[in-house]
Every structure is written in C-alpha cells, then in structure tokens.
Image: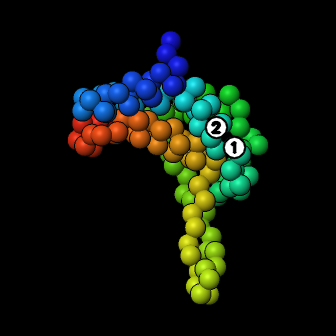
C-alpha cells in the first residue's frame, strides 16, 4: 500500500506533466492522509476552539477518523455549519470569522492537500472527482 506522501507525489507529478487526475474522491478513504492533516493542524491555536459542537482536537482518535471515512464511503458526510464570531479590527469595525467543527477542519485539510498536489501547473478542468 502506498503512503500518503507517495500518493501526493504522484498527484503532483501528474499535475506538473499536465495529465488528468481521475478518481480523486477515493483518496479521501486513506487514513494516513487524515493523520498527516492532523499532524499539520493539531498545534494551531484554533485547534482547541470549538465550532457549533464541542468537538475539538482533544477528542480526536483513530476510531473517529475511521467513522469519518465510513461516512464518506456511504456518501453521507454532512458539513456542520460554522460558528460565526466577530473580531474587532483596528478602526473599530468588526470582521466576521467562521469556526468550523474539528472534523470539518480535518477533512478540509485532507481535501486541500489533495487538490493542491493535483493542481500544480494544471487547469482545474483536468481534475475529475
């Protein structure tokens, strides 16, 4: 079985050569991509900030990752609404800030890493889900 780095390198190489990338959705079923995303996100300041649920990085486990993957396989994953907060700007105005749940953050990072690797040097029309 290929590692997450190998898969991302293959996608990156195909993108650089201008080759189409197909069946990208099935890469969302790879546990090691979630572990890679977790390693990137867990130390961020916002990882302990709850979204609309109380779920944070503290509650993450391999069982939760496997449950997310199973939900994605069934095509039943539902994004939770982001919690909206307003933070002050220098001139007194407020800027809206959306805080997604931890599961959504993790899945967003996995998708971002796949799309960034696949889109290096190519147009979006060559990526097929």
Residue drawn 53% across and 19% down? Answer: 3
Question: Is residue 116 depicted above or below 32 in this figure?
Answer: below
Residue 49 or 36: which is nearer the viewer?
A: 36
Q: CA distance from mark 1 to mark 2?
A: 6 Å
Question: Is residue 102 depicted above or below 33 in this figure?
Answer: below
Q: Quadrant of residue 50?
A: bottom right
Quadrant containing the C terminus in the rendered view:
top left
Residue bearing mark 1: 42
Q: Which mark is residue 38?
A: 2
Q: Residues within 10 Å of mark 1 (few under 14, many from 20)?
A: some
The x, y position of residue 64, in whole percent, is 66, 33
Q: Which mark is residue 29?
A: none
Mark 1 and 2 residues: CB-CB less than 8 Å, in contact?
yes
Residue drawn 59% across and 87% down? Answer: 91
Residue 122 or 93: which is nearer the viewer?
A: 122
The x, y position of residue 76, in whole percent, is 47, 37
The x, y position of residue 56, in whole percent, is 71, 48
Residue drawn 62% across and 87% down? Answer: 92
The x, y position of residue 67, in whole percent, is 60, 31
């Amino acid at each position: 079985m290929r590692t997450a780095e190998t898969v991302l390198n293959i996608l990156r190489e195909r993108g650089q050569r201008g080759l189409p990338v197909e069946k990208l959705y099935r890469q969302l079923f790879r546990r090691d991509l979630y572990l890679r995303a977790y390693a990137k996100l867990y130390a961020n300041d916002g990882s302990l900030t709850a979204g609309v649920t109380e779920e944070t990085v503290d509650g993450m486990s391999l069982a939760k990752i496997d449950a997310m993957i199973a939900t994605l396989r069934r095509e039943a994953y539902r994004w939770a609404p982001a919690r909206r907060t307003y933070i002050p700007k220098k001139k007194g105005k407020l800027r809206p800030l959306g805080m997604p749940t931890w599961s959504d953050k993790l899945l967003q990072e996995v998708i971002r890493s796949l799309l960034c690797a696949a889109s290096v040097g190519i147009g979006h029309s060559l990526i097929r889900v």
